[in-house]
Each structure stands twice: as C-alpha cells, then as structure tokens.
Image: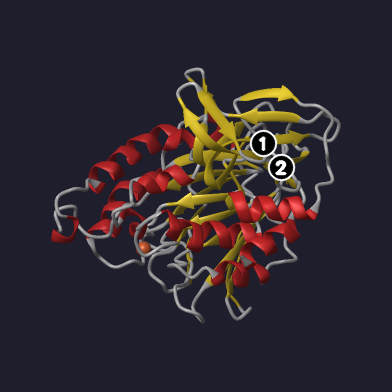
Amino acid sequence: MNNRRNFLKQMSLLSVGAFTTNVAAPVFAIANRRQESFMEDNLTVPPYLQNLTATSVYVMFITAAKSYSWVEYEGEDNAVQKMHMEDDGLYDAYVKLNKIYIPDLQPGRTYRYRVCSKPITLFEPYKLEYGEEVRTGWFTFNTPAADAQEISCLVLNDIHESPEAFGKLLSLVKDRPYEFVALNGDTFHYQTDEQQIVDHLLLPCTNVFASQKPFLMIRGNHETRGKFRREFKNYFALPNDKYHFSFEQGPVFWIVLDTGEDKPDDHPVYAGIVDFDGLRERQAKWLTEVVKTKAYKEAKYRVVLMHIPPYHSGDWHGPMHCQKLFSPIFEAHSVDLVVSGHTHRYGVHPPDTDHSYPILIGGGSKDGTRTIMHIAANTQQLHVDMIRDDGEKVGEYTIKAKY
Ligand SMILES: [Fe+2]
C-alpha cells in the first residue's frame, strides 16, 4: 500500500497504442479519492514505460481485476487521444497485464498520459458488464529528439531481488539527467511467478522512475532460471520480442546482448532443456549484420550492454563462449565500450593485450558492493561514472569522439 501511495504522489503524465481515437474534453483534474480508489481497487502495478523511441512507446500496467483498459495521452498542442490494443478485431480486454503501443509520436516532445480501466464483472457470450471506470492521474514522458547530439542513461546490474536498492542507487545520481535505465542482468535470483516480478521490480521501479522513464530489461543468467522463466518476457516490450537488440539514441549506437547461462548447456542443473550455445551463436550472426549497417558505422560511439563480460569473468563455459563469439566482432568493428555485470566485482578494465576496447563491470549484489553507472555522451566525449552505494565514485572512463 505504501508503494501505491508513493506512486500517487509522483503522478504527473502520459502515453501509447495501436488504435487511437480522439476523446471528448480532457479531464485533467482527477479527485484524489477517485485516484486512490483506482489504485487500491483496480491497479496492481502503475504504468511503466517500455521501448520508448523518438516516435513510439509502450505503456504497460497490471490491473487487479480482469478489465478493459486504455491509455489517454496528449502532446503539447494536441487533443487527448485514446489508445488500446486490438488484434483480430478484438480489443485486449478481460486481461490484467496490459501492453499498449502508442505510435506516431513526435520526436523531442513532452507527452502526458494516464491509464483508464473498467473491470469486467460479468463476461457471458451475449452479456458483458463493467464495474466502475477508474483512471490514474497524469504522468509525463519525453520522446528523444531525432537528431539529439547528447544522451545520458543509468546502468544497474545484479540487483538480485533487493527492491530497496533501486531507490537507494538512483538517489545517488538524483541531480544527473538520464533518458533510460538499463538493468544489466540478474535483477532476480530466478523466476517464480508474477508476484515476484511485481514486488521486486515493477513496484520499486515505478515508485522511483519507471512511469516517466523507460527501463531496458537485459537478461542475465539468473533470469533464465526458474519455472516462470518463459512468462518473464511478457512483462516487457522488447524490440522484435528478443532480449538482444540494437538502437540509436543520441550520438550512441547501443547493442544489447543476451549472454545466456554461465555453465555448459549439458550441465545437470539445466536438465536438458536449454540451448544457450545456439542462442549466442545466432546473436553473433545477427551482430555481424548489425555492424555492417550505416547507422552503426556512422555512430560517434558504439556501446555494448551485456550481462556476462567477455573478459575478467573466469573461465566457465558461458564467459568463454561470449569471448570466442563476440570479442572478435567487437575488435574488428571498433566497439568503443562494453558494460557488464555478473562477477559482483566492480572494476574498470581499460584496453589491454586481450581486448582493445574498455570493459566496465558493475558491482553487486550485497550492500557496500553495489554500483550505479551514469553514462553521458555528447559530440566531444562519452564519459562513465561508476558510483558505489555509499556514494563514493569507484571508477570512471572517458572516450573521446573519433571525429
Ligand atoms: Fe550473472
């Protein structure tokens, strides 16, 4: 309940979908009583942003009851629009987990949005009844400018089910700008059920930032474990529905890799139901095509986010396979920076005889060893600060622009 009340205090604004209509006069002021009623009675998780681009975003949230839900949003000088999801002629209704896509946004703009929902109290073939319609307050988000010359973001890794760590670590950089938060693997120990995702990720993040800024769910080896491992992906909006993807934002070309498990696929603990060698090999093939693109070649900086680092992570199968497959591509195509976690030993590893690119590894998962990284890039340089959870800067690295 505290989480929900904290969420109410933060309310400010907006977002998304696949089907849009103008709605009648916007009602910006919502009575507190009504907000609380919505939060307490029909919303398990406030809205969180996913895959925010210059022209689109996904708004996700979870209702307590099976409902018909939608998002209302508006730009600085646009009418309020309504967006919900439709497939095969059917609205996404009588569901709790909502993933609403909003296309056709303008780059470099501020939008505000709110979530609206009607519980479906009776669903018979020829008769459907709704409960009370409820809506949140307004939130805001900013779409990246299409030609932005700077970018900043935060990187957390190896949180390992410590929900209080999100607020604590972000408070250390509260005066710094950032456009997204990268969760660089092992946010969990293993996947059990939805409640675990709600309690250990979604509520802590929406309490701090996730209704206004998106996060990237980068899979670590621990997210591949547990009976809920396959359903896990449903709670995020990943580009092409894959854990590996690339995107341009600011002067940086970002590559996200899914480094899989650390042990060999035939290890008894995996019981014959994984193929991470195949996954990594497919990604290496994909990466060889990505680095051929104009966007990659022309980017001022190329940054890779991958949970298991290609070096400085021991000689188990997973790290060595990452090294064998990915590092030659990084070398041949001038990757500027690799940012990882996994080892629980924070450190800055400049280029050496093994790797021509710097590798920054964040800490975790115990208090006193956690870190948050702030990456900021402009036309002159890319700079990373690594800050330990006691507030001390324990690492930094600067890359000068090549041109
Ligand atoms: Fe790990």
Question: Looking at the picture, which amino acid does disc 1 mark?
Answer: Val
Q: Position of residue 377 (x, y in %)?
A: 66, 52
Q: Which residue is disc 2 drawn over?
A: 114
Q: Earlier in the sequence, mark 1 or mark 2?
A: 1
SS at circle 1: strand
Task: Confirm or deny contact between disc 1 and disc 2 (CB under 8 A).
Answer: yes
Give the side of residue 392 with respect to residue 11, left or right: left
Q: Quick one: 92 or 49, which is closer to the camera?
A: 92
Question: Which residue does the image show at 33% across and 46% down from the upper left?
Answer: 230
Query: Residue 389, relative to residue 300: is it above or below?
Result: below
Quadrant showing the N terminus: bottom right
Question: Which residue is denoted by mark 1 in the rendering?
Answer: 71
Residue type highlighted by circle 2: Arg
Camera-side residue: 310 or 308?
Answer: 308
Residue 188, visible in the rendered structure: yes
Whether residue 369 sits left or right of residue 168 in the image: it is left
Expressed as whole percent of the image width and height from the top left, the position of residue 87 reads 49, 22
Instruction: Report, in whole angstroms, how far the alpha carbon at label 1 lies from the one at label 2.
Output: 6 Å
